[in-house]
Image: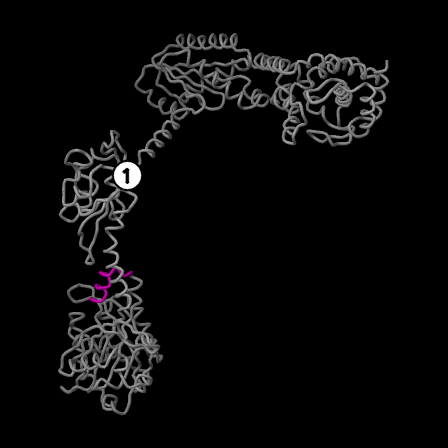
């Protein structure tokens, strides 16, 4: 505390100072550097319920809330270092109540930093007021109480705390040099009014605008009173509260109240508000449109449930006031989040249609925390419910075939405990991978759909038919015998044969296995047994099924390219001639003939628009065309007759210089059969008409072969081919 000569009696007489401050509204205290209370004013009893005499000589922890003690001790340590400090803490009242206090401490210079003097203010009401104004806890915790001590005339400033300096920007000397304490008031009239009140021995409490050093006018609340000693007034002590934020919040709140009705009126979601008497006080336009009932018709009514349901029953907004209401039959789901009720359900009819809604109802509180009403907002979720139902169906049905999916099958299988017997038929589509690899997944999907339709057409509503995934189907029956399952399996086989007779594009081949149990039904074991039986049948039919698919693919290729047969005949003749010209052993000639006929079998998987395009191919189209060698490889590997030439089919577009495809092989890495075929194939292609050009002459074709010798073709083989063609 700064002392001046005018106030020297206070400095020199500690006992007199203690008496002087007893009448201050706050609590004056003095502690030593051990935290021991050396003096505390009687007003401590108002804050703690404990007489000052009981506290005197004890540690400050006597009345400080334990969790806040570290903050208080830290503040005291700062004060002992010479820094004025302010700390907020909680006090446990004798009756158990929690009070809030703020202590401002400053070093007692005379005690050589062994004692600290300060004032404790009860800020419980201040905190409560700020809570009513919806201030955040952070704002409450950071709010300080600026304090100022003046002489008896209220003119000379004797002490100010750090909070006061921060608020006004004035130091003590600056205040006094500027004319004294009145300089901080908004007008001399206010200063006189405060002085005239407290000089009569009455405390003054009020609000005015405080003038800061930089000229700003700061709204403040002031609590001030006299300091007396031996019944003699010797000074004035005032505690300020910055009201800037409060004023702003008050203005915002008033503006918010004015905007409330407008906001609710134009909310996009149907919304209504009721007061604590359950009467409608707001009913917005969106709700008018949804219900067909106007705002004027609803204001003041408490029977709003009639609008939604046509009868009196609990609504979401009613659950806010009475959580114990029975609502089981009112909504599909009801939940609570914080202090809101959220519910979904089918509610009312409007414009001849029912609506699914999702509503949120919340309580409305006044500044004291009392519930004064409730607000409910409604969303039409009919479309969302429709999508949810679709998703539910997706969870039960296979999207490609429309049959039940694996999840549904397994769920139903769990329920078999109530039946005497159960049987499972497992069906697997043969050759599906080959079809996918060669003709594409669209054709494979069509094959799966065809299989599903064939199986489904064999049975009535009895039993469960499901696609288990990929190429596998399963059928579940109850109360059946092994003979029943054999008859059902044969029915599927007959349906497949009938399908293949009418639909020759890609033949269906299905491997079937079944199992039945009359003991305790173990679905997993039953399914495994049926699956094993199916695979045994698949082993027997695998080669014939693949051969059928391969033959179908060849027929498809011939139907798409009328020149395939003639091209194959010419190519076979040239390949054999060149092979014999270079002394290829005769035992290899049959495979070469087969290679000449089937080297382009992979083109069955190339789209017609690319295969028969009259003009040049784009880069993407050419990349797609190049896939035919890999597709052909997969087809050949699936056929026992073509498997020996599968590797040649894969590599028949490799070039001598390594720039061919698909592997980029070069020179001796390329099989001899491929080196022979590539020359013969190129010659026949050049001398035959194509969709995009006319045939070349023999002489032009020979010129092209010579030009590509060493790059695309083996030079020596080109010469031998020319000689063979002449013969």
Say which of 387 and 100 sits in front.
387
Q: What is the basis of the colouring in this image? A: one colour
Q: Is residue 353 visible?
A: yes
Residue 349 versus residue 148 in the image, above or below: above
Q: Would you place residue 419 above or below residue 233 in this image?
A: above
Q: Where residue 88 appears, x then y in whole percent?
A: 28, 69
Q: Is residue 128 magenta?
A: yes
Residue 260: x %, y % from top left: 24, 52
On screen, residue 449 versus residue 318, left or right, reads right
Local crowd at mark 1 within 10 Å, few (<14), some, or many (≥20)? many
Q: Secondary structure at mark 1?
A: strand
- Magenta region, mostly helix, strand or loop? helix
Where residue 435 sits, quadrant-wise, is top right
At a point 24% along the width and 86% down the height, the residue shown is: 155
Q: Nearer the viewer, residue 225 or 411?
A: 225
Q: Residue at the location (22% across, 37% down)?
A: 292
Could you tell me residue 514's position as x and y percent? Answer: 44, 14
Residue at image position (52%, 7%) is 501
Q: Quick check: can you spot residue 53?
A: no
User: How many discs appear?
Assistant: 1
Task: Give the quarter of the image for residue 640.
Answer: top right
Residue 579 position within the rendered picture, expressed as x and y whole percent measured from the top left? 80, 17
> Residue 476's image quarter?
top left
Judge from the rendering whether residue 637 lies leftward or rightward of residue 262; answer left or right.
right
For disc 1, the marked residue is 358
Residue 719 on the magenta span? no
In the rendered structure, the answer to whether residue 433 lies left or right of residue 523 reads: right
Question: For the magenta stretch, what is the residue range?
Answer: 125-136
Q: Nearer the viewer, residue 564 or 266?
A: 266
The relative height of residue 655 versus residue 545 in the rendered view (above or below) is: below
- Which quadrant holds the N terminus? bottom left
């Amino acid at each position: 505390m700064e002392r001046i000569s005018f106030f020297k009696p206070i400095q020199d007489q500690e006992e007199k100072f203690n008496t002087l401050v007893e009448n201050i509204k706050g609590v004056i205290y003095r502690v030593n550097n051990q935290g021991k209370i050396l003096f505390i004013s009687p007003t401590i009893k108002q804050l703690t319920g404990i007489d000052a005499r009981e506290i005197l000589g004890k540690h400050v922890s006597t009345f400080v809330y334990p969790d806040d003690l570290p903050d208080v001790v830290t503040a005291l340590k700062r004060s002992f270092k010479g820094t004025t400090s302010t700390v907020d803490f909680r006090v446990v009242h004798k009756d158990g109540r929690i009070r809030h206090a703020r202590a401002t401490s400053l070093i007692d210079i005379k005690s050589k930093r062994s004692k600290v003097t300060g004032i404790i203010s009860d800020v419980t009401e201040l905190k409560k007021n700020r809570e009513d104004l919806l201030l955040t806890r952070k704002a409450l915790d950071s709010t300080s109480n600026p304090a100022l001590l003046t002489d008896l005339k209220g003119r000379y400033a004797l002490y100010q705390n750090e909070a006061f300096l921060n608020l006004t920007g004035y130091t003590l000397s600056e205040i006094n040099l500027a004319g004294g304490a009145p300089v901080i008031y908004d007008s001399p009239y206010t200063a006189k009014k405060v002085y005239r009140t407290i000089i009569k021995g009455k405390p003054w409490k009020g609000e005015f605008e405080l003038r800061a050093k930089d000229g700003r006018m700061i709204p403040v609340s002031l609590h001030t009173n006299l300091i007396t000693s031996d019944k003699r007034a010797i000074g004035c002590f005032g505690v300020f509260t910055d009201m800037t934020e409060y004023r702003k919040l008050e203005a915002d709140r008033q503006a918010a109240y004015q905007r409330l009705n407008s906001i609710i009126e134009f909310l996009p979601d149907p919304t209504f508000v009721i007061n604590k008497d359950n009467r409608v006080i707001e009913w917005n336009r969106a709700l008018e449109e949804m219900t067909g009932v106007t705002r004027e018709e609803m204001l003041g009514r408490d029977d709003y449930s009639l609008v939604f349901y046509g009868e009196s029953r609990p609504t979401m907004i009613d659950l806010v006031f009475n959580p114990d209401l029975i609502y089981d039959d009112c909504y599909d789901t009801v939940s609570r989040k914080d202090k809101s009720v959220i519910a979904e359900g089918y509610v009312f009819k409007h414009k001849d249609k029912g609506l699914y809604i999702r509503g949120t109802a919340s309580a409305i509180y006044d500044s004291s925390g009392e519930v004064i009403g409730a607000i409910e907002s409604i969303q039409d979720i009919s479309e969302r419910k429709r999508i949810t139902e679709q998703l539910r169906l997706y969870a039960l049905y296979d999207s490609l075939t429309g049959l039940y999916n694996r999840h549904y099958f397994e769920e139903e299988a769990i329920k078999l405990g109530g039946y005497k017997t159960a049987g499972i038929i497992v069906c697997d589509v043969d050759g599906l991978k080959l079809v996918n690899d060669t003709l594409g997944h669209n054709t494979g999907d069509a094959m799966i759909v065809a299989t599903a339709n064939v199986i489904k057409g064999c049975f009535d509503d009895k039993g469960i038919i499901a696609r288990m995934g990929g190429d596998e189907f399963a059928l579940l029956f109850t109360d059946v015998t092994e003979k029943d399952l054999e008859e059902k399996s044969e029915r599927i086989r007959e349906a497949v044969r009938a399908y293949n007779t009418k639909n020759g594009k890609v033949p269906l081949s299905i491997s079937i296995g079944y199992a039945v149990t009359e003991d305790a039904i173990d679905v997993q074991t039953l399914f495994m047994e049926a699956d094993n039986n199916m695979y045994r049948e698949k082993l027997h039919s695998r080669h014939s099924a693949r051969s059928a698919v391969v033959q179908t693919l060849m027929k498809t290729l011939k139907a798409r390219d009328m020149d395939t047969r003639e091209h194959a005949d010419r190519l076979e003749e040239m390949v054999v001639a060149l092979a014999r010209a270079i002394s290829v052993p005769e035992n290899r000639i049959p495979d070469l003939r087969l290679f000449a006929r089937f080297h382009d079998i992979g083109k069955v998987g190339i789209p017609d628009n690319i295969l028969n395009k009259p003009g040049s191919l784009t880069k993407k189209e050419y990349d797609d065309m190049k896939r035919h060698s890999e597709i052909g490889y997969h087809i050949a590997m699936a056929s026992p007759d073509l498997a020996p030439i599968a590797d040649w089919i894969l590599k028949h577009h490799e070039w001598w210089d390594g720039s061919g495809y698909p592997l980029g092989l070069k020179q001796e890495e390329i099989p001899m059969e491929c080196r022979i075929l590539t020359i013969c194939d190129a010659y026949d292609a050049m001398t035959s008409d194509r969709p995009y050009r006319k045939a070349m002459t023999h002489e032009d074709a020979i010129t092209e072969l010579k030009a590509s010798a060493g790059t695309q073709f083996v030079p020596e083989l080109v010469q031998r081919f020319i000689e063979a063609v002449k013969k």
